[in-house]
Amino acid sequence: MKTRTEHPIAPLAKAEIERFRAAVYAAASANPRTLPWREAIDPYRTLVSEVMLQQTQADRVTGKFVAFVSQFPTVAALASAELSELLKAWQGLGYNRRALALKRASEAIVERFGGIVPPNRKELESLPGIGPYTAGAIMAFAFDLPELFIETNIRSVFIHHFFQDRTGIHDRELLPLVAATLDRSRPRDWYNALMDYGVVLKRDHPNPSRKSIHHLRQSRFEGSNRQQRSALLRTILAQPGLSADDLATRVRGDREQIALNLARMEREGLMVCRRGRYFVRDRP
């Protein structure tokens, strides 16, 4: 089997593009997903869902998303919320820095764009926590614009159809195919269909994305540094003002590692230490 050597695929014929689109739409239609962020299209809801979906599977996000947008229904509501309240609502999703980035993004949207999520990719990418993929997804799902982006399910579809005899596939090999096959008349529906089809492929076949050079296996949570960070934050949210020694007695782990994590989380802006006691940083 060939590995790591890139061989650009010849441009697709119109008939081949039409067959591919038909296959994607048919598979997605036969296996639809009901997701709350698809039910009422709103740029803010799309922003929240896309940040939540970074590194977290859709089935874990669904319930949290509904509760979150009920508690923080607008950009302005999120921007003005206390970080501690936001982090409490985020519990269970992991990677809490995303919550901080989402709050900072909402503050920037209020300050720079009058509380309106901008329909401009470069402006979206200028926001905290919004990279090229997330910006492209917001453009497609919130504004129904034909922007290019790739995520794991989309990657699976293109690898399954066009690279079955390859491994070590780079996204730059996939992007021309994503561009050529994009249904520009209905990009939102098209990307939803691609993602739903990708879920089906992963269910019914060995995960095609494993052939991608970008494929990463999520590290084990139990006993990990992520677990300790999560436990520290959860403990401080429940009982603000604990000292490092207090936290070390409540959170299992090496005291030196706990001290390192506390210092790192303070630098990230998640918490602040005042006179040796730790609090969530609700104010700059």
Image: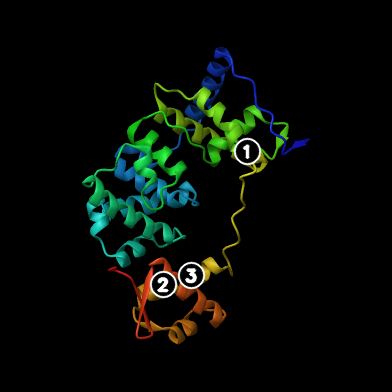
> How far apart are labels 1 and 3 at the CA level?
33 Å
Q: Residue at coordinates 38% horizontally, 75% vertically from top-left?
A: 236
Give the CA separation, mark 2 to mark 1. 36 Å
Asked if residue 248 is positioned above or below residue 131 in the image, the reply reads below
Q: Secondary structure at mark 2?
A: helix
Q: Residue at x 37, y 72 (%)?
A: 271
Residue 34 visible in the picture = no
Q: Quadrant of the C terminus?
A: bottom left
Q: Which residue is label 3 attached to? A: 229
| Residue 45 visible in the snapshot | yes
Give the image location of residue 174, x and y in percent.
Answer: 58, 32
> Callout 3: few (<14), some (14-19), or many (20+) C-alpha neighbours within 10 Å?
many
Q: Which mark is residue 202?
A: none
Q: Which residue is the site of mark 1?
A: 170
Find disc 2 in the rendering and name its residue.
266
State whether residue 170 is above or below residue 64: above
Spatial separation of the CA atoms under disc 2 and disc 3? 12 Å
| Kind of residue at disc 1 | His
